[in-house]
Amino acid sequence: MVQLVNKVLKVSKSKFMKYGVPFLIAIIGGSFGLKEFTQIKYDYAKVKPIDTGELKKLGVDMKKPGEVTLETEYEKIKDMDIDNWEQVRGPRPWEESVQN
């Protein structure tokens, strides 16, 4: 019995038991933990898109995919006068509460 205790004490004082085993536990345990944390991203990414009927109920008017192009947007913007404009400062949140 005493010999067994001595062997256990000798093994527990070795460098492998002090540094090697905790390192291996951290590496192997970390890989399992990392797998679980990265799986969360894929579990919650499966969000279904909003139906166009629901968007119309909310007041959002969706355009057809081919209706909006760079050329059509350029035609809207090219007639604007972008050289003459006035910078208007928006109200801050604390200013809105005072005015209300």
Image (spheres, rainbow, N blue to C red):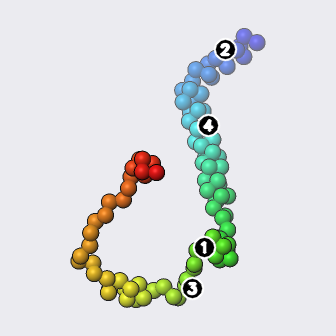
Residue type at mark 3?
A: Lys
**Mark toward the start of the polypeptide (4 vs 2):** 2
Label 1 element class: loop
**Mark toward the start of the polypeptide (1 vs 4):** 4
Which one is nearer the viewer's eye here, 71 or 3? 71
Residue 19, compared with residue 68, is above or below; it is: above
Which one is nearer the viewer's eye here, 28 or 72? 72
Please identify, in this view, whether the residue under mark 3 or under mark 4 is nearer the observer.
3
Picture residue at 31% right of the left edge, 64% below the top: 88
- For disc 3, the marked residue is 64
Is mark 3 in CB contact (under 8 Å) with mark 1? no
Q: Which residue occupies the extreme top position in the image? A: 2
Which image quarter is the N terminus in? Answer: top right
- For disc 2, the marked residue is 6
- For disc 1, the marked residue is 59
Q: Which residue occupies the extreme front position in the image? A: 100
Please identify, in this view, whether the residue under mark 1 or under mark 4 is nearer the observer.
1
Is mark 4 in CB contact (under 8 Å) with mark 2? no
Residue 46 rendering spot, x and y as whole percentages: 66, 64
**Mark toward the start of the polypeptide (2 vs 1):** 2
